[in-house]
Image: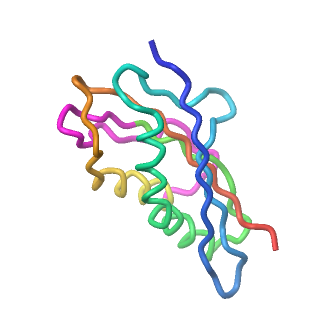
C-alpha cells in the first residue's frame, strides 16, 4: 500500500534579467506523491531532495531564461534500490511541457545515491512544481 508523500521545497536562484524562480515539490493535481511508508522514511527523502534544491533549480533556471513564463509540474517516477541507488527513472506527468527540464531532472536524479536503502526496490513518484518568482 502506498501512502501519500507531500513535501514542499522552495528555493530561489538569482537571475539578472528575470526574477528568480520558485521551485516547490508538491502534489500533482490528480494524485499525491507516494512511496511505501514502510520502505522509505518520507522525512529523510524530503531532506535529501532539499539538499539538491540548487541543482533542481538550475534545471529550471536554464529554461526559464529562455521562457520567463515557464510554469508547471513535473512528476518524476523512480525506484530506490536496496543499494540506495535510483533506477527506472522516468516522467509520469509533465504540465511544464519543457523537455529540457524533464531531461535535466531525470539525469540529475540518476546521479543521486540515497543515504538510506530500503530492503527491496521501492517506487517513488515525486512532483516538482516550478513557477517564476513574482517581483
Q: How many marks?
A: 0
Residue 98 versus residue 7 in the image, above or below:
below
- Quadrant location, the C terminus: bottom right
Residue 9 versus residue 16 in the image, above or below:
above
Instruction: Read off the magenta span.
Output: 78-99
Residue 29 belongs to magenta span: no
Left or right: 118 with respect to 28? left
- Residue 46 horizontal/vertical position (percent): 48, 44
Q: Nearer the viewer, residue 134 or 7?
A: 7
Residue 135 versus residue 45 in the image, above or below:
below
Work out which residue is located at the far right of the displayed protein and give it.
135
- Residue 4 horizontal/vertical position (percent): 56, 24
Which picture quadrant has residue 133? Answer: bottom right
- Residue 10 horizontal/vertical position (percent): 62, 57
Q: Residue at x 41, y 41 (%)?
A: 44
Which picture quadrant has residue 14? Answer: bottom right
Q: Residue at x 53, y 65 (%)?
A: 57
Residue 80 belongs to magenta span: yes
Q: Residue at x 39, y 51 (%)?
A: 106
Work out which residue is located at the far top of the displayed protein and give it.
1
Work out which residue is located at the far bottom of the displayed protein and give it.
16
- Quadrant location, the N terminus: top left
Left or right: 15 with respect to 41? right
Amino acid at each position: 500500500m502506498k501512502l501519500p508523500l507531500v513535501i514542499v521545497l522552495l528555493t530561489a536562484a538569482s537571475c539578472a534579467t528575470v526574477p528568480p524562480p520558485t521551485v516547490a515539490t508538491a502534489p500533482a493535481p490528480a494524485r499525491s506523491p507516494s512511496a511505501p511508508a514502510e520502505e522509505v522514511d518520507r522525512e529523510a527523502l524530503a531532506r535529501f531532495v532539499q539538499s539538491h534544491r540548487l541543482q533542481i533549480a538550475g534545471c529550471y533556471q536554464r529554461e526559464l531564461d529562455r521562457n520567463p513564463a515557464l510554469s508547471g509540474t513535473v512528476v518524476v517516477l523512480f525506484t530506490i534500490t536496496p543499494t540506495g541507488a535510483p533506477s527506472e527513472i522516468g516522467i509520469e506527468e509533465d504540465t511544464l511541457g519543457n523537455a529540457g527540464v524533464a531531461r535535466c531532472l531525470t539525469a540529475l536524479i540518476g546521479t543521486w545515491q540515497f543515504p538510506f536503502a530500503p530492503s527491496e526496490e521501492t517506487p517513488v513518484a515525486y512532483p516538482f512544481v516550478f513557477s517564476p518568482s513574482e517581483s
